[in-house]
Amino acid sequence: MFIHRKDMWAIVAQTDRNKNPIPFEIEFVTADQNRQTGGEIKHIAQAILYKKHKSRAAGFSKPAANTNNTIAGVPTSNNTLPNHYQNQTLNLYDLDQQKIIKIHTQLILSINKHEILP
């Protein structure tokens, strides 16, 4: 079965009635232009869209207010904050490996076994 890229967002952003993210399966191709690596097909069996303000039910605590322009203790400026829309990226949380993964939306091959049409 196929779905359009725009319909993919509805799956990625799904939440249950308690506003907890619903896990999905995703397959994508890796790419890193800075390191000139990539081209591997990766599969995550249980992923959720990662946001800084995850619910406690999903195993995340609400972060403290960021008054000193840091992310995870690393100093940043407003120019270095990620612009996911412009860069066509999103951060996923792999529930099995318990780590955050940044992927390029154009390199997503399938979600919940539905191939993505361009």
Image: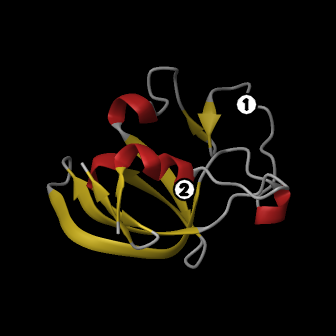
* Residue to which mark 1 is pinned: 66
Q: Residue at x 50, y 51 (%)?
A: 91
For residue 40, above or below residue 117: below
Where is residue 84 drawn, in percent x and y?
A: 44, 36
Q: Inspect the image, locate mark 2, and give the three-letter code of the amino acid beneath it.
A: Ile
**Quarter of the image where one finds residue 55:** bottom right
Q: Number of marks in the image? A: 2
Q: Residue at x 61, y 72 (%)?
A: 95
Judging depth in this view, the residue of 12 and 72 nearest the camera is 12
**Quarter of the image where one finds residue 67:** top right
Q: Quarter holding the N terminus?
A: bottom left
Q: Inspect the image, locate mark 1, and give the three-letter code of the amino acid beneath it.
A: Asn
* Residue to which mark 2 is pinned: 11
Where disc 1 sits, the SS reads loop
Mark 1–mark 2 contact, CB under 8 Å?
no
* In-image side of 61 versus 100 (left or right): right
